[in-house]
Image (cartoon, rainbow, N blue to C red):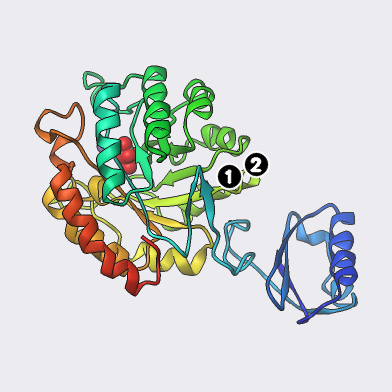
Amino acid sequence: MIIIMKPGAARENVQAVVKYIEENGLKTHLSEGTTTTIIGVVGDKTRLTECGINSLKDVDRIVPVTESYKLVNRKFHPDATTVKVGNTEIGPHTLTVIAGPCAVENEEMLVNIARHVKACGATMLRGGAYKPRTSPYSFQGLEEEGLKYMQAAGKETGLATVSEVVDLASLEAAVKYVDMLQIGARNMQNFCLLKEVGRVKTPVLLKRGLSATIDEWLNAAEYIISEGNPNVVLCERGIRTYETATRNTLDISAVPVLKEKTHLPIIVDPSHSTGHYKYVTPVSKAAVACGCDGLEIEVHHDPARAMSDGPQSLTFEKFDELCRSLRPLADLENKKF
Ligand code: PEP
Ligand code: MN
C-alpha cells in the first residue's frame, strides 16, 4: 500500500506515520515530491489497520498496491529516476547512447571503437568480457583481462563503461573495473545473481529475459533494489516470438508500458532485438520517438571479422549516420544528446 499525505504535510507528521508503520514491523519508502509526500509500505500489511493510519495527522488517503513489485513501482515513486553512471547519467533528461563491440577482443580494437563512438555522441562504452554464448564452442570472452581493457578504454576516452556479469566471480571482478554491471537476458531470473548485484552499489543494466513478461522483469528489478541497490536501469532487447525474420521481436510497446508501471529508466537494444545491422537504424529511431531513455548498440571496426555478433554490428560510418539522425528526435523528446 501507499499512504498519500496531504499537500504541504508537516515533516513531523510524516515522521510520525513512518514511525507507526515501522513499529508494526514493516518497512517504509519515502518519496517526497514538490507538494506531496508518498509513503510506500512493504511487508505484512495484516498487522496494520486502516483506521489506525487514517487517525494520524496529515494523512490524506491510503491506496492499495496490488502488484507484487513495490520499490520499482511508479505508485511508490511518481517521479522518473535518474541513475548516475560514471560521469554520465541515464534518465528522463538525456538520451544516453551506449555503444561498443559485442565482445572485447583486444585492447587496441576496444580503444579504437571507444574513440569513434565517443566522437559520434555516445557517452557509454559496452563490451562483453564474459560471454554467455548459445554454443559452448563459440568465443567465451577474455574474462578479467577483458575488464581491464574496458577500464583502460574508459580512462582513455572518458566514457562510462558497462560489461556483463554471469556469476559471483565475474561480479567480484567487474566491480573493480567497470561503472555499470549488465545482467544479460539469459540471467534475468537468476535470482541468486540478482541478489548479489543488489548487495553492491554499482549501477545495474537489467536486460529483459528471452521470454519474460513485463511483470516478471519488474520483479527481477525488485530483487535487486530490495537488497539495497537502487541504481537499476531496464533494457528491452527483444523477446522470442514465432517470427524468424529478425533474431528476436522488439517489444516497442514495452517502453510506454514501463513508463506507466515503473520510475526506472528504460534503454532499448536494437542490435540483439533485430539481429541485423540494416534494421538497427529504423528501430533505434522508433525507440527514441517512443520515449526510451537511451540505446545500447553494437559497433565494430570490422563487423565481418567480429568474434561475436558481427551481422548485427554497425560500422563506424553507419553508427555516425545513425547518431546524426537521432539528434532531431532527441530534441523533440526534450532529451539532451
Ligand atoms: C549482450 O548485450 O552482449 C547480450 C548478450 O545481450 P542479451 O543478454 O540481451 O542477449
Ligand atoms: Mn552481442
Give me the disc on residue 223. 1
The residue that mark 2 highlights is: 227
Q: Quadrant of the C terminus?
A: bottom left
For label 1, the crowd category at 10 Å Cα-Cα, with few meaning under 14, some 14 to 19 and many 20 or more, is: many
Q: Position of residue 217 (x, y in %)?
A: 46, 51
Marks 1/2 in contact by CB < 8 Å: the verdict is yes
Q: Secondary structure at mark 1?
A: helix
Ligand 1 under 8 Å from disc 2 Cβ: no
| Residue drawn at point x = 40 percent, y = 34 percent | 154
Q: State the separation of the CA atoms marked 1 and 2.
A: 7 Å
Task: Say which of 267 and 160 sits in front.
Answer: 160
Task: Say which of 162 and 230 sits in front.
Answer: 162
| Residue drawn at point x = 80 percent, y = 54 percent | 26
Q: Secondary structure at mark 2?
A: loop
Residue type at mark 2 is Glu
Task: Say which of 44 and 218 sits in front.
Answer: 218
The reply to whether residue 94 is in sight is yes
Residue type at mark 1 is Tyr
| Residue drawn at point x = 45 percent, y = 45 percent | 206
Q: Is residue 85 above or below residue 108?
A: below
| Residue drawn at point x = 50 percent, y = 22 percent | 173
Q: Position of residue 333 (x, y in %)?
A: 36, 72
Ligand 2 shown in quarter: top left
- Horizontally, is 93 left or right of 284 in the view? right
Where, by quadrant of the figure, is residue 37 drawn? bottom right
Q: Position of residue 211 (x, y in %)?
A: 34, 48
Q: Is residue 23 above or below residue 149?
A: below
Q: Quadrant of the N terminus?
A: bottom right
